[in-house]
């Protein structure tokens, strides 16, 4: 008998459902609770997959410990699980019910386990997240300073801006030490940065947020970044293809890279010009460039060969 397990994650607790046995239990989301979880699931015969939703990093301890124990754990996209729940008519929502739905989803879909990040990927992801926060605060405070009248308030804002700029420089220096001090990351960053349109910030975002890069098919890479178009149609009705889901930070970084590449990368600029000439809207063309850019970057990391203009 094949067994799948669904785990609903919250800050303090892990609700667990074992399918098809129907067993449900809960443990605390801490070292003791996760150790108990690993022990109980490790004794299951016929276990093929354990699914957890990505939920604000509260799942990381459980995922790491389950993986270390050699158990088949996979981190799921919450949106896909919600769509599945609606499809099977599951409207009630509690933590135990959510755990059961996750177990059923894993049994029905059989998602491929995602490779865990390298040992220091979490550290780099945290640094990149903090950098984004500082940049957002800095932009907002600079705007407020520009709009403030001269006086004590404007002086106060200037001090905050200076402090944020110092903090941003410190974070950038730490990111640089982290990446350049790790040979594998240093080599990958150099490969990614060889592509016109990809600077250090975009390269490091990809290293932190998509550690699987180089091991994916073009379709898988586009889906993970939320750049795979989904067609909407029913009968004779034809809706527009749209993109959604995926890893938002990766998609945002690639969009910015596409804007630069559309101007300075001869290959992608020609690609954009062909799309525009064919009547595609400019935004659609940029999204297509972002998707093509991701496919190129995935191949560069896979082949370990820098960009070479055709």
Image (spheres, grey):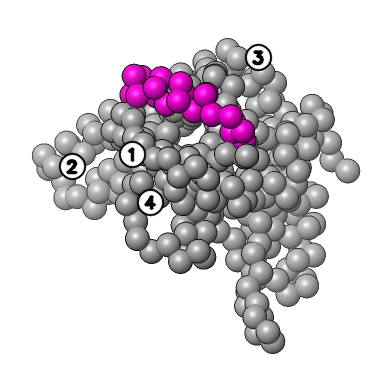
Question: Most extreme residue toward the left, as rendered?
Answer: 152
Residue pointed to by mark 1: 10
Give the CA separation, mark 4 to mark 3: 45 Å
Q: Position of residue 47 (x, y in %)?
A: 59, 33
Give the CA separation, mark 3 to mark 2: 45 Å
Question: Most extreme residue toward the right, as rendered?
Answer: 310
Closer to viewer: mark 1 or mark 2: 1
Give the CA separation, mark 2 to mark 4: 53 Å
Label located before the other in sequence (3 or 2): 2
Label located before the other in sequence (4 or 3): 4
Rate crowding at label 3 as few (under 14), some (14 to 19) or many (20 or more) other CA atoms within 10 Å. few
Rate crowding at label 4 as few (under 14), some (14 to 19) or many (20 or more) other CA atoms within 10 Å. some
Q: Which of the labelled discs sits on residue 97, or is there none?
A: 4
- Residue 46 in the magenta stretch? The answer is yes
Closer to viewer: mark 4 or mark 3: 4
Label located before the other in sequence (1 or 4): 1
Span highlighted in magenta in the image: 30-48
Closer to viewer: mark 3 or mark 2: 3
- Seen at 31% across and 29% down, the residue is 28
Label located before the other in sequence (3 or 1): 1
Rendered position, 148 above or below 212: below
Horizontal side, residue 254 vs residue 19: left or right: right
Horizontal side, residue 90 vs residue 152: left or right: right
* Secondary structure state at the residue bearing disc 2: helix
Q: Which one is in front, 301 or 264?
A: 301
Give the CA separation, mark 1 to mark 4: 14 Å
Label located before the other in sequence (1 or 2): 1
Q: Position of residue 279 (x, y in %)?
A: 73, 75
């Amino acid at each position: 008998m094949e067994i799948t397990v669904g785990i609903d994650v919250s800050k303090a607790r892990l609700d667990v459902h074992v399918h098809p046995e129907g067993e449900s239990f809960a443990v605390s989301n801490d070292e003791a609770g996760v150790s108990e979880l690993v022990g109980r699931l490790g004794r299951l015969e016929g276990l093929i997959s354990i699914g957890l939703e990505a939920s604000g990093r509260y799942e990381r301890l459980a995922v790491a410990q389950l993986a270390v124990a050699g158990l088949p754990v996979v981190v799921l996209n919450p949106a896909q699980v919600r769509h599945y729940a609606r499809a099977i008519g599951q409207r009630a929502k509690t933590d135990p019910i959510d755990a059961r739905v996750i177990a059923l989803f894993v049994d029905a879909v059989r998602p491929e386990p995602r490779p865990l990040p390298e040992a220091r990927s979490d550290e780099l992801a945290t640094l990149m997240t903090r950098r984004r926060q500082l940049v957002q605060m800095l932009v907002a405070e600079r705007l407020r300073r520009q709009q403030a009248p001269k006086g004590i308030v404007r002086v106060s804002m200037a001090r905050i801006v200076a402090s944020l700029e110092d903090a941003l420089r410190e974070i950038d220096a730490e990111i640089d030490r982290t990446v350049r001090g790790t040979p594998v990351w240093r080599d990958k960053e150099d490969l990614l940065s060889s592509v016109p349109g990809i600077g250090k910030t975009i390269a490091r975002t990809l290293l932190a947020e998509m550690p699987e890069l180089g091991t994916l098919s073009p379709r898988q890479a586009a889906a993970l970044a939320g750049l795979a178009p989904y067609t909407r149609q029913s009968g004779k009705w034809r809706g527009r293809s749209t993109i959604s889901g995926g890893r938002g930070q990766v998609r945002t970084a690639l969009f910015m890279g596409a804007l630069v590449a559309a101007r300075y990368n001869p290959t992608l600029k020609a690609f954009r010009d062909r799309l525009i000439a064919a009547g595609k809207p400019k935004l659609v063309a940029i999204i297509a460039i972002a998707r093509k850019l991701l496919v190129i970057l995935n191949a560069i990391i896979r082949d370990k060969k820098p960009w070479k203009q055709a």
